[in-house]
Amino acid sequence: MFWGGIYDPSVGEVRAIANPTIDPFTIFGYLFGFARGQWNPLGMAAVDNLEDVIGGHIWIGAMCIAGGAWHITTEPFKWIKGAFTFNGHGILSYSLAGVALMAFTSCYFVAFNDTVFPPVFYGSDRTQFAFVQFALCLTFLGGHIWHAFKARSQTGKLSDRDNFSVFMAGFLGLAILAISLVLLTFKPL
């Protein structure tokens, strides 16, 4: 649309996206695994044209701005105040969960999408990049669990069962992270 364009792997050159897709059925269809009117197991990673990619980013940007305005101008509902913890660790915990979700989404795109991560820049085997994104996802998820535990412990809402559950979740997260890092360093013969 502006500022020169974006690299399009289907034509092998940088081009401006003059008509991004803003049809909500097309854009949000990817969330439910529908691409071009039929189900696709890749879901969002099935996007194969830059018009849909840029249109999706326009939708995400608009929703983030609207959500920011909503949260600035309104107070949380009563049931939200009871269900969530509003202290420094709690807010950090929720933010880390969001970053972990985005890292997992990025991992999925790196592994399966040639439009967003073209092989000309990233190579045909992007497994290492996907493992790095997955390791980051697990790191942020572990931070989310840790800070959620700290937030709840500061409010005195934790039982012994909660302590054990958080310990096990943290242990499993670290185990998966360690295995991922070992696999990341593995080089096939």
Image (cartoon, rainbow, N blue to C red):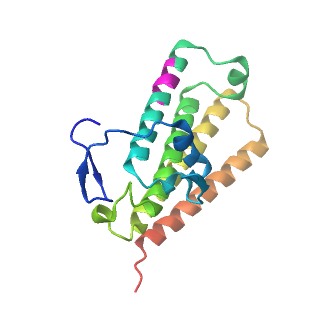
Q: Residue 181 magenta-drawn?
A: no
Magenta: main secondary structure: helix
Q: Nearer the viewer, residue 119 or 169?
A: 119
Q: Which residues are magenta?
A: 64-69
The answer to whether 61 is drawn above or below residue 185 in the figure is: above
Q: Nearer the viewer, residue 112 or 142?
A: 112
Q: Residue furthest left?
A: 4
- The residue at 36%/70% (across/down) is 124
Image x and y of residue 104, in percent: 51, 52
Relative placement, left or right, of 107 versus 167 is left
The answer to whether 187 is drawn above or below residue 134 in the figure is: below
Relative placement, left or right, of 28 versus 160 is left
- Give the quadrant of the C terminus: bottom left
Q: Nearer the viewer, residue 101 or 158?
A: 101
- The residue at 44%/40% (across/down) is 21
Image x and y of residue 47, in percent: 47, 53
The answer to whether 122 is drawn above or below residue 142 in the figure is: below
Q: Nearer the viewer, residue 146 or 134?
A: 134
Q: Quadrant of residue 10?
A: bottom left
- Give the quadrant of the N terminus: top left
- The residue at 53%/52% (across/down) is 36
All told, the count of numbered labels is 0
Image x and y of residue 5, in percent: 25, 43
Image x and y of residue 158, in percent: 73, 36
